[in-house]
Amino acid sequence: MKRIIIDHSKVTDEILNIIMEDYPDGYTDRDVLKFKNHKGELIEALEIKLGDDIYLVKVGTKLDKAIDNFVEENDEDSDNEPADDLDVDEDLLKDEDSDDDED
């Protein structure tokens, strides 16, 4: 398994989807790994498993903005699509219509 360190500019939609699934309410300090890179710099990252690789996604305000933009884009896309998962009870609709006729 490879461990790949990436920053917000290299995060793919697939990785952002996994972050949203793993951290639906956002991530906290307890979720963040802290380690030093080969230059001795402190890195804070989320560990995301994708296939045979582990991505260490650097956290910070830029990642937060990337996640916010991703959520907004997906919300806009879902607003334009019809809701196929709604079941309507036709009998209830008929009862409401008949109540209106009685008034």
Image: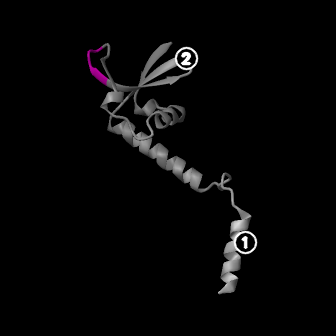
Disc 2 crowd, CA 10 A, few/some/many (<14, 14-19, 20+): few
Count the marks: how many? 2
The percent position of residue 1, horizontal first and vertical second, equals 51, 12
Against 46, is 81 above or below? below
Task: Find residue 81 and report its image quarter.
Answer: bottom right
Find numbered disc 1 in the image and state the secondary structure of the residue it sits on. Answer: helix
Q: Which region shows up in magenta?
A: 39-43
Question: Which residue is denoted by mark 1 in the rendering?
Answer: 94
Question: Which residue is denoted by mark 2 in the rendering?
Answer: 52
Against 3, is 100 above or below? below
The percent position of residue 48, horizontal first and vertical second, equals 46, 25
The percent position of residue 97, horizontal first and vertical second, equals 69, 76
- Which sits in the foreground, 26 or 69? 26
Magenta-colored stretch includes residue 100? no
Please state, as top left, top right, bottom left or bottom right, where the C terminus lies in the image: bottom right
Q: Nearer the viewer, mark 2 or mark 1?
A: 1
- Which sits in the foreground, 35 or 27? 27
Is there CB contact under 8 Å for labels 2 and 1? Answer: no
